[in-house]
Structures are given as C-alpha cells and as structure tokens.
Image: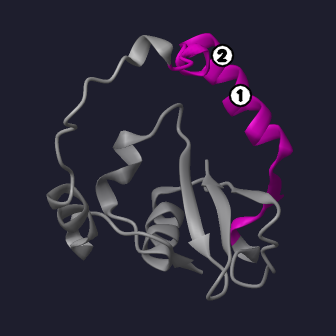
Amino acid sequence: MKLAGKGSSGGLCKAFLSNIAVSSTAVDFSLSPYENMLKMNYDRELQQTLRDSVPVGFAAVNSTYFDPSKSYRVMFSSTNEWFILGQQSSIMGGMQCRTYCGVVPLMCQISVYSLCRVILT
C-alpha cells in the first residue's frame, strides 16, 4: 500500500502552494452549495461512508486485495498499530491529532492508474 500524496515533508505541499494565484475576478461563494459542509449534514454523510466501507482487520491489511471501486475501513486498537499503519502508508505521525471524530481518510495507490479510499479508525 502506498499513499497517493504526501505532506510538506515530501515537498508536494510546498510545490502546490507556490502555484496558487489570486483570482483576477471576484468570486461569489454564496452561489456555491454549502449544505454538505454543515456539521449535521457532514456527520450524516461521514457515518454513511463509514457504514458503506468494507471493514479490514489490522492483521489482514497487507494480504487484502483493495478494489478501487470500494472504500475500506481499517480499525486500529493501539498506538503501536497506528504507528505501523502510518509507516506502511507514509503518513506523518502528527496526523492522528488532526482527525475528525477519530477518522483518517487516505487515498492509497493500488496500481499505477488506480486509487482506493482507505479510512483509518
């Protein structure tokens, strides 16, 4: 399993931020749909995503074939398991304290052209 993108330690974040430019025209954000960003709606969508994801045991992570059309939920029960999962997927150690409701979503590269959503809980 290989993480599809890396944080600032991989240099991708800095390169991405350096390419952002200020828009030359005004943007009216009130015209954009915002209902899915409200906490009640976001939590409902998050719960549905977690229910629809296929549970994978910690011990079976390396032996499981991840189908790109599905999302998977990997549950860890100890700090040691978290560090092992973080090492395998190349995520930074501080990511655990930046989670929302204890959920860390990842897009993992399965093959050259396919990505799969993996949710660490």
Percent x, y for residue 3? 49, 73
Crowding at dot 1, Cα within 10 Å, few <14 / some 14-19 / many 20+, comes out as few
Crowding at dot 2, Cα within 10 Å, few <14 / some 14-19 / many 20+, comes out as few
Percent x, y for residue 73? 72, 54
- Report the amino acid beneath label 2: Asn
What is the magenta segment's predominant secondary structure? helix
Percent x, y for residue 63? 77, 85
Q: Residue at x 21, y 51 (%)?
A: 20
- Report the amino acid beneath label 1: Glu
Number of disc labels:
2
Q: Is residue 4 left or right of residue 11?
A: right
Give the farthest residue toward the front.
25
Q: Is residue 6 left or right of residue 79?
A: left
Q: Secondary structure at mark 2?
A: helix
Quarter of the rendering containing residue 58 = bottom right
Q: Quadrant of the N terminus?
A: bottom right
Q: Which residue is mark 2?
A: 41
Q: Nearer the viewer, residue 77 or 14?
A: 14
Q: CA distance from mark 1 to mark 2?
A: 6 Å
Q: Is residue 2 left or right of residue 75?
A: left
Whether residues under marks 1 and 2 lie with C-beta atoms below 8 angstroms apart, the answer is yes
Q: Which residues are magenta?
A: 32-58
Q: Residue at x 71, y 21 (%)?
A: 44
Q: Residue at x 81, y 56 (%)?
A: 55
Q: Which residue is mark 1?
A: 45
Q: Is residue 117 above or below residue 59?
A: above
